[in-house]
Structure formats: C-alpha cells, structure tokens
Amino acid sequence: MKSFFQLISLLTLSLAVPADAIERPTVPLRETIAGLRIEARTYPDQAATEWQFRLRAPAAGESPLYENLKSADFEVAFPSGEPVTLHWSKGSHSDPGDFEPKTETLTTGKTFSLESFGGRSSDGVMPYFNLSSEGGGLIVAIGWTGDWKASFTLESDGKLRVVAGLKRTRFRLAPGEEVRLPSIVAMNYRGDQMAGQNQFRQLMLKQFTPRNHPPMTLMPVQAGVHGILPFNGTTEEKLVKLAHDIAALKLPLDCYHLDGGWNEGGFPKGQGNPHADPGRFPNGLAPVGAAVRQTGMRFLAWLEPERAMRGTWLHREHPDWLLRPTGTPERLRYQERDGFHLLDLGNPEARKWAIESISEEIRRSDLSFYRQDFNLYPAYFWHTDEKPDEVGLREIRHINGLYTFLDELARRHPSLILDNCAAGGRRLDFEMMRRCIVLWRSDSTWGAKTFPQNVQAMTHGLSYWLPLHGLGAAATDDLALRSGMGACGGFSINYRDPKAVLALRKYLDRYLKIRPIFTGDYYPLTAHSLDKTAWIAWQFHRADLNETLVQAFRRPESTSETLTVKLQGLIPQQRYEVENLDGGKEVRTGAELMQGHVITLREKPGSTVLLIKAVK
C-alpha cells in the first residue's frame, strides 16, 4: 500500500494538511539531548515510522543529569475546526473489563493523560493510541515494557501536541554506558477509525510479530494438561502417560502445554527454585519433552525467572541479585508480606545466570515454546532505596536487560517461540510483541463469575490492536468453545472423557478451517459490553481470501431473539455463500450483507458462527 501522505518538512514538526489527511511527524522530539542517538525505521506499506532511542554517556568524566526524558514530543496539525477523538483501551488487570475500548474527545487547551500501572506496560492501559478526525488520523504507540506516560493536548491553533516516554527520570549514567529508551511508532491513515485500526493490525502482524515461523505456526492449538492435573500435582510419570494418551486420540492438537507448579516448591512459593521438583521429576523435564516429541506435538513449558520467593534457592544463594519491594499500596502489600523478590536483570551477573539456566532448560527439555510469566508489580521493587540521581535508572537497566535476555534466547534457539504471559497480558507493548506471542491475554478467564461475557468482551476489545491472540476453553459446550475462539487456543479439558473429546473434535474440525481469518481486518458489529441483557458481535475479514467470519453471542438475559448486523469490507456486487456452522447455507450479495443481515438465536445464552465466502 502506498501512503497517501506527503512527508512533512524536516525543518518543522507540522504543516497545514488537507481535510482528509493527517501527517505523521518526521522527527519525534522538539529538543536535542546530549548523547541521544535516534534511529528511524520506516514501514511504507503501512505508512508508519518507528524511532528507537539510545542514550550514551561520555566515555570519561561525569555524566549529565538526565531529567524528564521523553521519546515523543511533537505536534500534528489536524483539519481546522474538526473535532479530534482519542481512541484508547484499558489494559489487562485481571478484570472482566480488560481491553475495553475507550474514547475521549479532546478539548482545546486541556491535556488528557494516560499511564501504565505498577511497572508493566499494558497493566491498566494499553500503550496504543488512535487520534482520529474527519478523513483520517494518526496512531501512536509506545514500545517499552516498563512504566510509561503519555499526554495529548489540543492547542488553540488546531495543532495537537503528543508527549510520551518514561514515567520517572532523574539519573546519571556510568562513563561510556549506553541504554535504550522507549521506542515510538507513528502511523497515519486515511478514512475512519476502523480503517486506522486495521492498518495498524497489519503493521503489528507484519512488522511486530516474531518472524521465525508463519502466524498459524507461531500460534498453537494446545492440549493443556491442567484440565486433569493440578499445577502442583504433576509428575514425570503422569505427564508422560497423558502425552501418549492425548496423542492416541488423534485430535488436531499441535502443542502440549505444561503451566506452573513443576519446579521445586511448586507454585507460587517455589518461584526462585529454578529446577524441577526432584521428588516428582527425578530426571527433570527431559523425559517429558522426549515423550512429547515422540507424539509429534510441540512442548510448551512455563517459567518465571524474574520472581524469587523468600527462602528459595535464588534468595539463599544470590540475595545480591534480588530487589525487594517497599511502599506498596495496601491491596498490593502481599508482595512485602509474602516475600516477593525481583531478579534484577539490569545486573550483568544475574542476567548471565538467567540466560544460561533458561537456555539449558530449553535445550534439555526440548522446548518448542518457552512461556515467561511475571507475577509482580516491578515498579515497587525498582523504587526501593533509589538514590536521588538514579531515579528511573534501575527500571531502564532492567528493561534493557530483559530485551538482552529474550534476544539471546532467540539467537541461541532460532526455532524457539517465546510466549509472553506476565500475569495475563500485562506486557503487550510492541517491543515485547516483536519478540513474543501472547497465548494468555488476561487472568480473568473461564473461572470468573462473569464468564463467558468477560472473554467475549476481551476478544472484542483486544482485536482493535492485536491480530494474534485467543484463549481456548476448559469446557466443551459450544458457548465456552466459541467464546474463546481466536488465532490460538488452549484446551484444558478432561481428555479421558469420551464425550468431551468428541465435542472438542467436532469443534476443532471446524475451527481449524476458519482460524486464518483472524489475521485479517476486524470490525466490531456491536458495542463492547459485559451486559447480560445485550448481544455482542464482531467480524473478521480476509479480503485476499474473499472470506469473512462473524461471531455473535446472545447473553443470558437478552429479551431479543434477533440481531441485525451490517457487515463491512465486502464487494457490493459480489455473491457470497453464508454458512451457519450450526447448519444451513444461503447466498447473499455483498450489498445485502452490508445493508443489514439478521441473526436469529432462540436459545439464551447462545452463539452463532457464520463463515461467508465469495462464490461465482
């Protein structure tokens, strides 16, 4: 795709623009900073620019005092007299409303600010922002896996000022030290808000997704062991037998998923003990990995290297590598009471140990997927005993160390797929997404009182920004399976129940045929909602395949049996076959489907999945 925007002058940050176009800046900062190096990367097919920032101290002598560092401070001119709306989304916080889309109409002279919570980039707020106006808009994203803040000010002359970067900075660097700072992406687009969202989805898919496998290989269809075995109840014998039992069912599953609890001490108190429990796994995970490989499935194992609990091996042997929390609010005080510690990846020795130990586990256990979890709020650890001229430095060094750690694992194990969990979807910035996939987007899932409304709403909300995500199910009724449908899925069911296996087989046979459509354009067909009296529906569309997928859910207290949806992205004169996966087909033109298609569900709660294909 060619950008319809003209590059603005290198001598200015903004120019007057035509009524249907918003220009992205060519330079991200108003002011220069001594020692700051900015590298620009352009993505012309998506009309986007990425800026990476590196700050280097002088080789000798005292470093300057760096305060209030920013990675973005620029102005953009929107069409004169037109309102500007900021579209943003809640992040993950283990809440039923995770990823809820939000809007704010910007008011002249007033600043609207957003920021992350507790040290993880998508905790509370997603680090992605769509500024839309008549005819076009600008999307800005922050690539930083720690704390960030952003502000948006509509000024009296019609220009919009965007400021974004680290939340707290006042520090000096060691002589010759170089650190990375938050990256910024700016992408301009023509059309309405969803035109921008879909252009950004393709940017994320093509530029900020691991490239060592194609998307449908990156995103697994998993057999989760914990529908049968509890976290701390796994053993070598049980896992080996279960792998062979699942393989014997000949279900189209390509991944065997072992989550937490296998290490010595179990979950959560054993975090900081890096090895398998010797009583349950006398030979480590290697025999499990070998058994999984024999079945033809890929092996996924969970680890949490950044957390160490009181009394564990890391706490006993290397307290100098660990940070403790202080000043936590009452609702997070458990971190102090229960003995949480953070492995300081900014410490070169600690980071080297993490790289070597995790890399050896990957090799020894023959892992295809390495899941990294992160169940603490690191900001309260970074702040502990912080010196006046080191404010923010511990965070910067830790996040730099995290990138070094992940990049080295990828270098040593080229086919390895990194899975970023972080207490469910709390590190979803684009710097993590270019390195990792996300298989667990929130800790509010099928165990929540709001299920399945919560997971339906999360698909609705997160799909504005990310093309590759999903959930799966822990039950095999249609409503549970369809509510967790996405580009991936983990199925933690009882694989020894023939009825459950039969239901899953029926679902997978249909699901695998439509799964690639989730990488296409996304259109919400109803408002985002957790309301039990409402319907919720959305559409995914692959123009290159001439295929569309519609999902609709009637909530348990809805009084209406019908929902009329207006599909998008179709060719008006094209004829389409509309197949209801519960049975029945009909042919409609694109114009008819875009004018309004009626979905009927007698049952409540109920669900419908429509596969729509172009026909001659």
Image: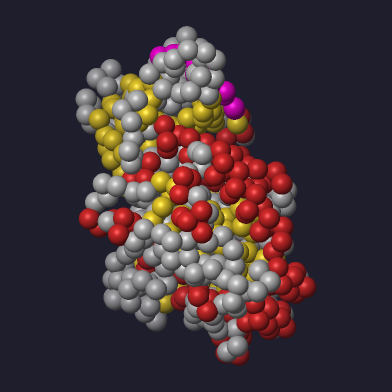
Q: Position of residue 608 (x, y in %)?
A: 48, 72
Q: Is residue 180 left or right of residue 77?
A: right
Instruction: Determine whether 180 is above or below 273 in the image.
Output: above
Residue beneath the point at 38% across and 78% down: 605
Residue 367's quadrant in the figure?
bottom right
In the displayed structure, would residue 115 be above or below residue 48?
Answer: below
Q: Position of residue 62 (x, y in %)?
A: 44, 15
Viewport quadrant of the C terminus:
bottom right
Is residue 542 toward the left or the right of residue 387 in the image?
right
* Identity of the residue furthest to the right in this view: 294
**Image-based side of 354 in relation to 552, left or right:** right
- Can residue 40 be found in the magenta stretch? yes
Q: Nearer the viewer, residue 204 or 571?
A: 204
User: Which residue lies at the image location 45% right of the left edge and 34% below the top edge?
Assistant: 396
Towards the viewer: 269 or 551: 269
Q: Position of residue 291 (x, y in %)?
A: 73, 74
Q: Residue at x 31, y 28 (%)?
A: 388
Q: Quadrant of the N terminus?
A: top right
| Image vertical order of residue 25 relative to residue 408, above or below | above
Residue nearest the viewer, comparing 537 with 472:
472
The answer, for residue 299, to whether it is visible in the render is yes
Name the residue furthest bottom: 498
For this orientation, the residue located farthest to the top is 11
Q: How many marks?
A: 0
Q: Is residue 395 above or below residue 55?
A: below
| Nearer to me, 579 or 346 | 346
Question: Residue 384's x, y, as percent?
Answer: 33, 41
Residue 357 magenta-highlighted: no
Residue 4 showing in the rendered view: no
Write down the region rendered in magenta.
31-42
The residue at the point 43 percent across, 66 percent down is 269
Report the colour scheme. Answer: secondary structure
